Image (cartoon, grey):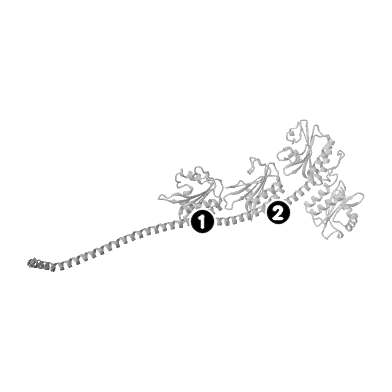
């Protein structure tokens, strides 16, 4: 390795672990510095003198020899008080990394040990049978390349057909390198489900299985052909821990010397494998931190619930390489759950009255299963899922939902995945709750505005049916209801009569209603009209007394009463063709509309009654006036008749008074005329 590469790796390691300084030391005849980080010329001279002190030389030699590795305090001239010196050896190259830091965590120590081992040119130990050393200088921390090179050197040790190298992950062996190529990579072998693997893990010794043995059928035949007759397994052990396994197979048994070489090689190679695994774990941890950072940046800027879900799914899809993601949130009214499912770029949502979540999730505990089968209590959200990880979403110690990941592969999710998803879940819970509260506030404001619009349009109307029709149309339009029916109780039999209808299916519903009989007392609408109690059914097929309208398929139904005081005089019924279309909040909005519409209809009814009374009074007034006029005419006629009678009586009296003397005069005149001569003037 070039000095520049050493310096770069020391710099990267120092920044990751917050080391004060670090240096590569190599022991040939004496210790010398071959690479450094944050060491100037003055400190370099002091450090060179320091490592040549007899006590320090003995300390470093002891660490290289495998003795107990204890940190020492940093000399005053090389650092601040309280700082410690940590040594990470590579016995093969006779090199060590000396790191100065206030403290190093276990993860940081494993990382530095990985640097010390993983960057050696002889990481996989170039034995006599190996034609070339393992060279990972070009990709020093790339696990697949390192594992492939390690397996290649092992396979060159003996004459065999092929082999694989696997690391242990819980109750599984996960293949990280295979001689047949990438087809078998990351395949997981269940330890508990294979008695042969269980035995090897238990006794931690090399194991041979021949074709005629009864164990042959249990040997993982990944890469076998018809000529394969023997299979070997060599466990990789660090201390008392089994970290993995190397498997090899061939046409004939290995010699005793070959088996001894392989035993020795696997013993020595185990530390390199663990170093690669440790660095990979640390890299994965850093990746998880990066995902959390991406999550914080992208998701926290989301404005609504749908956007939060979409961005969360995109991050989880990238982090876990699975599209089997779902999110469930409890509805605020406790009527069920709102579920979101990942279908690539499309997020589907639905509302259920219940969800089949594991019982421990309801209690706020994480659920993880490596194998989903017919006996599992967990019911997967996606068909064909083999493993699952479900995290409860908790807000102020209350479970408000769950975040689930599933995979087609067994045992995919680890304890580290639990930690990552749990952190993401805690953020999502807060975001969802805040988003829900914001949506509720916006919905209330929007509903109030729409209710105001409805009231504004109907408040000046004076006809009940016109009010009902306008209200039904506006409710269907403003609230996206598929069908709105306003019916009023009318007639001596107190039957519901259609007063207004609005929505998409008006013509179908009107035609269907004509062919229907009057609903019975047990029908939803009649029950609401009689009892005055609102009703919400998110699946009308479960209500045996629901009367379907011919030509109209109903999935969900809401119905509220129109009441004046305690007396119901009608209903508003809202229907949707979808099941689980309404929530308790929707019912509250409809009740608010019902209360206002009831008041308007009641006032319009009172106004109509008043108008009818006024008309009746006016008709009575006109009739009375006609009677008065006739009476006055009769009175005038009576007066005239009386006058005429008086005149007649007066004329008769005058005539009588005049007639008597005139009769006398006339009589005397006639007598006189008889006596007067005929020729008298």
Instruction: Tell me what residue is drawn at x 47 percent, y 47 percent.
Output: 523
In this picture, residue 145 sits left or right of residue 472: right
Q: Quadrant of the C terminus?
A: bottom left
Whether residue 565 is visible = no
Residue at the front extreme? 679
Q: Where is residue 161 in the image (x, y as percent from the top left)?
A: 80, 34
Give whichever of discs 2 and 1 has the lower sequence position. 2
State the residue position of label 2.
297
Of tags 2 and 1, the one toward the viewer is 1
**Which residue is identified by label 1?**
457
In the shown orientation, is residue 678 left or right of residue 144?
left
Horizontal side of residue 505 vs 126, given as left or right: left
Pointers 2 and 1 in contact (C-beta within 8 Å):
no
Who is closer to the viewer here, 377 or 469? 469
Residue at point 23%, 64% (across, down): 644
Q: Residues within 10 Å of mark 2 (few under 14, many from 20)?
A: few
Q: Distance between the residues labelled 2 and 1?
A: 46 Å
Does residue 328 appear in the picture of this structure? yes
């Amino acid at each position: 390795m070039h000095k520049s590469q050493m310096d770069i790796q020391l710099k990267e390691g120092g920044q990751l672990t917050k080391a004060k300084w670090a240096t590569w030391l190599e022991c040939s005849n004496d210790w010398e510095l071959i690479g450094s980080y944050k060491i100037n010329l003055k400190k370099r001279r002091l450090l060179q003198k320091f490592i040549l002190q007899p006590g320090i030389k003995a300390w470093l030699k002891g660490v290289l020899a495998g003795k107990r590795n204890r940190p020492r305090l940093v000399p005053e001239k090389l650092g601040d008080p309280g700082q410690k010196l940590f040594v990470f050896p590579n016995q093969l190259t006779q090199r060590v990394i000396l790191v100065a830091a206030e403290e190093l965590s276990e993860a940081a120590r494993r990382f530095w040990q990985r640097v010390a081992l993983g960057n050696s040119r002889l990481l996989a130990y170039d034995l006599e049978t190996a034609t070339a050393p393992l060279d990972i200088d070009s990709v020093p921390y790339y696990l697949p390349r390192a594992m492939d090179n390690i397996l290649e050197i092992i396979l060159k040790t003996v004459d065999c057909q092929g082999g694989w190298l696997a690391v242990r992950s819980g109750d599984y062996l996960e293949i990280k390198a295979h001689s047949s190529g990438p087809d078998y990579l990351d395949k997981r072998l269940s330890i508990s489900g294979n008695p042969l693997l269980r035995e090897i893990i238990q006794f931690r010794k090399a194991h041979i299985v021949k074709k005629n043995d009864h164990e042959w059928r249990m040997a993982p035949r990944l890469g076998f052909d018809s000529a394969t007759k023997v299979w070997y397994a060599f466990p990789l052990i660090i201390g008392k821990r089994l970290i993995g396994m190397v498997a090899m197979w061939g046409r004939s048994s290995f010699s005793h010397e070959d088996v001894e070489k392989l035993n020795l090689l696997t013993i020595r190679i185990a530390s390199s494998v663990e170093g690669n695994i440790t660095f990979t774990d640390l890299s994965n941890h850093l990746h998880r931190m990066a995902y959390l950072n991406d999550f914080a940046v992208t998701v926290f800027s989301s404005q609504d619930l749908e956007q939060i879900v979409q961005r969360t799914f995109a991050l989880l899809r990238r982090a876990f390489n699975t599209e089997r993601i779902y999110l469930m949130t409890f509805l605020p009214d406790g009527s069920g759950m709102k579920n979101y499912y990942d279908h690539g770029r499309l997020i589907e949502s639905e509302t259920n009255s219940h969800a089949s979540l594991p019982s421990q999730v309801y209690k706020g505990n994480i659920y993880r299963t490596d194998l989903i089968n017919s006996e599992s209590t967990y019911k997967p959200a996606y068909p064909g899922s083999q493993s699952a990880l479900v995290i409860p979403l908790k807000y102020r110690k209350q479970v408000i939902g769950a975040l689930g990941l599933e995979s087609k592969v067994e045992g995919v999710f680890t304890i580290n995945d639990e930690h990552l998803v749990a952190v993401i879940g805690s953020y999502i819970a807060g975001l969802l709750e805040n988003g829900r509260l914001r949506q509720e506030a916006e919905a209330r404001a929007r509903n109030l505005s729409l209710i105001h619009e409805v009231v504004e349009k109907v408040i000046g109307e004076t006809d009940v049916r016109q009010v009902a029709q306008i209200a039904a149309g506006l409710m269907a339009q403003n609230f996206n209801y598929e069908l709105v029916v306003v019916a009023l109780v009318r007639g001596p039999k107190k039957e519901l009569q259609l007063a207004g209808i609005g929505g998409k299916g008006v013509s179908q519903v009107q035609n269907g209603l004509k062919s229907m009989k009057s609903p019975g007392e047990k029908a939803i609408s009649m029950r609401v009209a009689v009892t005055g109690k609102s009703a919400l059914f998110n699946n009308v097929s479960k209500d045996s007394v629901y009367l379907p309208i011919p030509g109209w398929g109903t999935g969900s139904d809401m119905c509220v009463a129109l009441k004046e005081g305690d007396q119901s005089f009608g209903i508003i019924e809202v229907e949707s063709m979808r099941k689980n279309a309404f929530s308790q909040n929707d019912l509250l909005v409809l009740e608010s509309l019902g209360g206002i519409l009831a008041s308007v209809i009641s006032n319009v009814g009172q106004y109509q009654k008043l108008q009818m009374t006024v008309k009746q009074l006016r008709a009575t007034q006109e009739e009375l006036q006609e009677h008065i006029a006739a009476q006055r005419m009769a009175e005038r006629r009576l007066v005239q008749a009386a006058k005429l009678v008086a005149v007649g009586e007066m004329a008769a009296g005058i005539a009588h008074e005049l007639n008597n003397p005139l009769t006398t005069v006339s009589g005397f005149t006639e007598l006189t005329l008889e006596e007067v001569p005929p020729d008298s003037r």
